Image (cartoon, helix red, strand yellow):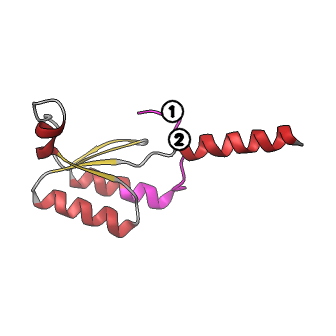
Amino acid sequence: MNAIIMYLFTRLTIISVSRRKPVLLIDESDDSLKATDLLKLSGIEYVEYDIKKFEDSCCGEPPTTNAPSLFAVEGTFKGLEKINEYISSRSNTDSDLESESAYW
C-alpha cells in the first residue's frame, strides 16, 4: 500500500511541475496591449515579459524577436494573428496539456 501511495505522490508532483505557462513578450505597441487583453479574457495563465526591460535585466542587447510573441509548449506564435490562433486552438483542446519536459 505504501508503494502505491508513494507512486501516486511522485506522479502528481511530476505532473504539477511539468505544466508550463506560456511566455508573452510585449512592448509598448497596441498589438501587445491587445494580446495581453485577449489572453486575460480567455483565462489563459501566462508570464508577461516586457522586451524593453530585457536590456536592463539580462544580457545587454534586446532580442530581435518582434513583440508581441508567445512562447508556449505548443510552439512559438509571433504577432497578434498567431496569438489569436493559439487562443483558438486552446479553446478547442484540453487546456491541461502536460509538457514533455520539465524544463524549457
> Count of labels shown?
2
Is 29 left, or right, of 74 in this rendering?
left
Q: Name the residue under label 2.
A: 18
Question: How many residues crowd around disc 1 within 10 Å: few (fewer than 14), some, or many (20 or more)?
Answer: few
Disc 1: which residue: 101
Q: Do the residues labelled 2 and 1 touch (CB within 8 Å)?
A: yes
Q: Does the magenta stretch include residue 102?
A: yes
Say which residue appears at 51% left-offset and 46% top-offset. Answer: 19
User: Could you give the CA–CA distance between mark 2 and mark 1, rounded to whole angstroms?
Assistant: 6 Å
Q: What percent of the width, then of the height, locates residue 34? A: 20, 63
Q: Which quadrant, please, contains the N terminus?
A: top right
Residue 55 position within the rendered picture, expressed as x and y whole percent measured from the top left: 11, 37
- Residue 102 location (% of width, % of height): 50, 35
- Tell me where residue 103 sits by quadrant: top left
Residue at image x 15%, y 58%?
A: 31
Which stretch appears magenta? Answer: 87-104
Q: Can residue 98 be seen in this view?
A: no
